[in-house]
Amino acid sequence: MAVTFKLNGKSQSVDVSPQMPLLWVLRDTLGMTGTKFGCGMALCGACTVQINGSPVRSCVTPVSTLAGKSVTTIEGLSPDASHPVQRAWAELDVPQCGYCQSGQIMTAAALVDKKVAPTDADIDEAMRGNICRCGTYQAIRAAVHTAAKYRAAKGAA
């Protein structure tokens, strides 16, 4: 059964098992390897992508649920790493090992797209469940605040 959806702004059709998790469609069928496998149970956040602008764990999302929806991966967030979250992540040197970062960034991007000035509590709630084994949580929080400022400045321009 073919499923058609938008992937990073472009129409995409895949003919795979309807129950195949989006993570494996992205990585194995479409060659989009920026989204990472972490736990396979939606517990760690490494596989987070956005579906219609909301963060979703792709490891447990059947491809059959995507018909007509819009999926954004880390590769589609911006063509040149200019998204406010990507800029803040780089400027504040957030990653250590980097494995979890695509999921962290996709979750943070959804937050700053919805909240103009997120509080620490907003950030902690939104990022809950995105595990960083290196423990960069304070840097992540600082980067989200910085990204929100960039997003607000961009909106005011």
Image (cartoon, rainbow, N blue to C red):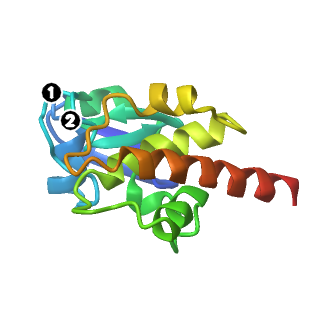
Residue 154, percent from left and from top: 77, 58
Residue 81 image offset from top left, x and y in percent: 51, 70
Task: Judge the density around disc 2: few (<14), some (14-19), many (≥20) Cα neighbours within 10 Å.
Answer: many
* Left or right for 76, reference 17: right
Choose between 55 and 95: the one closer to the eye: 95
Q: Secondary structure at mark 1?
A: loop
Q: Quadrant of residue 31?
A: bottom left
Compared across the picture, whether 117 is left or right of 5 comes to: right
Three-letter code, disc 1: Met
Above or below, 129 relative to 100: above
In the rendered image, the vertical position of residue 64 relative to residue 46, given as above or below: above
Q: Mark 1–mark 2 contact, CB under 8 Å?
A: yes
Viewer-proximal residue among 142 and 68:
142
Looking at the image, can residue 65 be seen?
Answer: yes
Q: Residue furthest right?
A: 157
- Label 1 belongs to which residue? 41
What amino acid is labelled 2 in the image?
Cys
* Quadrant in the picture for the C terminus: bottom right
Question: Which callout, 1 or 2, points to the residue nearer the camera?
Answer: 1
Task: Please tell me which residue lies in front, 34 or 124.
Answer: 124
Residue at (31% x, 36% y) in the render? 130
Q: Quadrant of residue 132?
A: top left
The vertical placement of 40 against 146, above or below, is above
Q: CA distance from mark 1 to mark 2?
A: 7 Å
Q: Which residue is mark 2?
A: 59
